[in-house]
Image: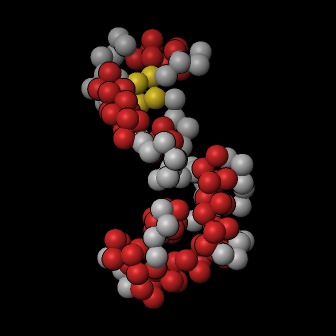
Amino acid sequence: MLALRSGAAGYLVKDIDIAALPRALHGVCHGEAAISRHLTMRLIERHRLTRTDRSGLRPVQSVLSGREWEVLDHLCDGASTDEIAEALVLSTETVRSHIKNILRKLRVSSRTEAVAAARQLRDGVLHV
């Protein structure tokens, strides 16, 4: 899945029928995806679980770490520092440190501005 998010045009399993390989490569060269039916179903299932508010989505390239995105997702849900600490099994001080880093990296001065920046990053509007 990460490869697809990073721009891959598909995914072929190593035991692909050798006769199908040229057809798959030709299709990719002409703008088609090379993807198995099994992976297609996994993508469909994952899409069904995606929240409509885009929370949880992360840009392919981001100045924030994965953990910082987790904290930011909780901020987007309106969670307090203590609630985030409990949900992520972190100390309150660690969460505060993550929030401080998020604000610095996003060049904002409040949690509200960080939530707005997260929405813009998910929509591809903001580039930090």
| For residue 87, side relative to residue 104 (left or right) | left
x and y percent of residue 98 in the render? 52, 78
Residue 59 versus residue 16 in the image, above or below: below
**Which quadrant would residue 108 be assigned to in this image?**
bottom right
Residue 26 shows in this picture: yes
Nearer the observer, 57 or 83 = 83
x and y percent of residue 59 in the render? 58, 51
- Residue extending furthest toward the front: 78
Residue drawn where x is 59% and y is 77% of the image: 101
Residue drawn where x is 53% and y is 52% of the image: 58
**Which quadrant would residue 110 be assigned to in this image?**
bottom right
Q: Quadrant of the C terminus?
A: bottom right
Residue 82 versus residue 30 in the image, above or below: below
Residue drawn where x is 41% and y is 74% of the image: 84
Residue 39 shows in this picture: no
x and y percent of residue 27 in the render? 52, 15
x and y percent of residue 43 in the render? 38, 33
| For residue 86, side relative to residue 123 (left or right) | left
Residue 5 versus residue 122 in the image, above or below: above
Nearer the observer, 88 or 30 = 88
